[in-house]
Amino acid sequence: MNDSVKRTTLSEGAYEAIRRRIITGALPSSSKLVVATLANALGLSATPINEALAALEREHLVTYLPHRGYFVSAVTAENVEDVYSIREVFELLAVRAAAQNADKAKIDQLGAILRAARESMRTGDTTAFSDLDLEFHRVIWTSTKNSLAMRIGELIGGQIRLLVATTARAPGRFRGAYEEHYAVYRAIKNKDPAGAAAAMRKHIRTAKVALSRAVSKTSDSSMPHAASKRSRPTKQRK
């Protein structure tokens, strides 16, 4: 039992460390993920690294290619369309519920996130801004008081985080995203579901356009994106 708990802890630690490197760009899109190299860098054995990569593949942050191994998933135009079409439907429902249900604590939390985001803009810290961007949306999901919405939000959170990290670096998105978030916050604070939905729609669609433009400039057609269909054995690979 103790060995199992320790193994789970090591796998979770490896997952968090590798995930962080992917979503911050330290491990670039389409780069090969070598188990031995990651294990050496993190001071771990191959087992927790393999388990972490399998979990990241389920989040679509990592792609497995038969006979070639794991790669950081590429962000493609098709990937942007897939994620944002689902994101818009989900987030509009969530923000309407948030505007109806958010209590003072949640509203204050959103305000604090915006203040921290403004500070990250002042210092030019894009990584902190991207973290705060996702946290802003996560507070909205949780303020719905709908357990299914929370699970759905977390399910797509990895993909959103990866795309948000990219759009935050797109020209004009640093301040633009902040201003769009502020409009959403103001509508939630005023308990205006229609206004919150309109502000969120504008935010998501503007972010999608910015990301699509960024992807068109840097697209790597040699690497299939994570959502591509493939069949392979599920047994653990060393």
Image: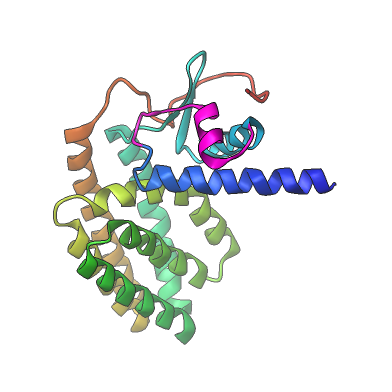
Residues drawn in magenta:
28-45
Q: Nearer the viewer, residue 165 or 15?
A: 15
Residue placed most toward the observer, 75 or 129: 129
Q: Quadrant of residue 73?
A: top left
The residue located at (48%, 78%) in the rendering is: 101
Q: Residue furthest top?
A: 67
Would you place residue 204 above or below residue 36 in this image?
Answer: below
Residue 107 within the magenta-colored segment of the rendering: no
Left or right, 137 with respect to 81, comes to right
The furthest residue to the right:
1
* Magenta-colored stretch includes residue 36: yes
As rendered, which of 54 and 36 lies closer to the eye?
36
Q: Position of residue 192 (x, y in %)?
A: 34, 78
Tell me what residue is drawn at x 54 percent, y 28 percent: 35
Q: Can you give x and y, in whole percent of width and height, for residue 180 in the image? A: 24, 67
Question: Is 228 located above or below residue 117 in the figure?
Answer: above
Q: Residue furthest bottom?
A: 104
* Residue 107 horizontal side relative to residue 210, left or right: right
Give the image location of residue 63, x and y in percent.
46, 29
Query: Residue 233 lies in what quarter of the image?
Result: top right
- Front-most of residues 146 and 58: 58
Please name the residue shown 45% across and 70% down the image: 97
**Left-right relation of 132 to 103:** left
- Eyeballing the image, is 129 above or below 47? below
Q: Quadrant of residue 40?
A: top right
Task: Determine the residue positioned at 34% across, 43% down.
Answer: 25
Which image quarter is the C terminus in?
A: top right
Report how many numbered discs are placed on residues in the image: 0
